Image (tube, rainbow, N blue to C red):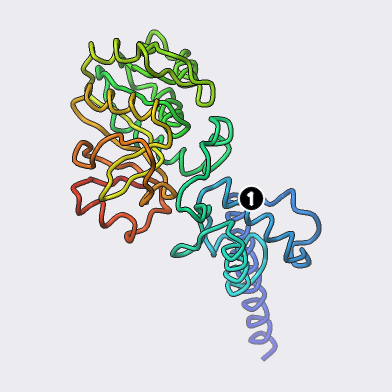
Amino acid sequence: MASRESTESTESTESTESTESTESTASTATADLIDVSDRPGDRDTLPAHQRREQIQRLVGERGFVRVRELREAFGVSGVTARADLDVLESAGTVQRVHGGAVPAAPLSGRPLREFSFEEALASSVLPKQQIGVLAAALVTSGQSILLDVGTTTLSIAHALLARTDLTDVVIITNGLSIALALEPAIPRFTVIVTGGSLRPLQHSLVEPLARTVLSQVHADLAFIGCNGVDAGYGVTNINLPEAGVKTLMLAAATRAVVVADASKLGQVHLGQVGPLRAFDTLVTDAAADEVMLAPLREAGLTVLQPE
């Protein structure tokens, strides 16, 4: 009898330790996904307004945050995590999507102003990194590519730089930040800057003179960034000078890929870049759900996004 009780006690202890170990591992894994180390105080006693401030910051930085991640990282129930997102959505700072939240679009459905390159660089960091890796995987050695200005296309440049298997790639860009990011890859890559008038807000080169270079080249592949992708209105951009250069790049490539995170899908802006039929592929992030993507697929776009 004593032996049986001892065995049951041992099994109970091992089961408890195993459960605690599993919970600890899951909690650590989630903490790796969401860095909440700078949160003041114990996570169970963090005031709701502070927790929501941190959730808002995380959504802005990551571009998409899951309810499950918030629940585990902040030590709250799923009901509380969803309630926090509902409060933030009511305040207009996030938008609820299936399974989590993304940064909210303004009430007009599009940005009220054009953000500077530096402002854009600080938002949706993870989605842009995901897009960059997927887009860079489309490039093979010996190809020539056009790389449009922008923070999403800068992520493509970084991903190309990390691909040490690539050689003899010619990259033509109108983005000064992109050209400088690619400089360490020379002579493995040939980097060509279009020329043109410098636009300080995006560190971009636009007309006049950009046409001079782009009218004399024909690349294998163009990666085009934008502010809006819509099934009816196509690909659009918030400012006309850069929209014009994007259109020139579109005409100078055999194949065109539009790169845009979920916040840009369904948006329409002033400058027309091209109809969807001018592109064969959209590379987007994990936050783009099928409701957003179905009309674009029906219009003929192949969609690539992380699993």
Answer whether residue 191 is visible to the viewer in this image.
no
Q: Quadrant of residue 132?
A: top left
**Which residue is disc 1 drawn over?**
57
Check the image and report above or below for 57 versus 179: below
- Image coordinates of residue 156 in percent, x first then y, are 41, 30
Left or right: where 291 falls relative to 16: left
- Look at label 1 and name its amino acid: Arg
Q: Residue at x 50, y 43 (%)?
A: 126
Q: Quadrant of residue 145?
A: top left
Question: How many marks overall?
Answer: 1
Judge by depth and name the residue closer to the eye, 242 or 295: 242
- Image coordinates of residue 214 in percent, x first then y, are 28, 15
Q: Residue at x 68, y 52 (%)?
A: 36
Q: Quadrant of residue 147?
A: top left
Q: Residue at x 23, y 45 (%)?
A: 302
Check the image and report above or below for 106 versus 74: above
- Image coordinates of residue 45 in percent, x first then y, are 78, 67
Q: Residue at x 23, y 40 (%)?
A: 275
Left or right: where 180 falls relative to 119: left
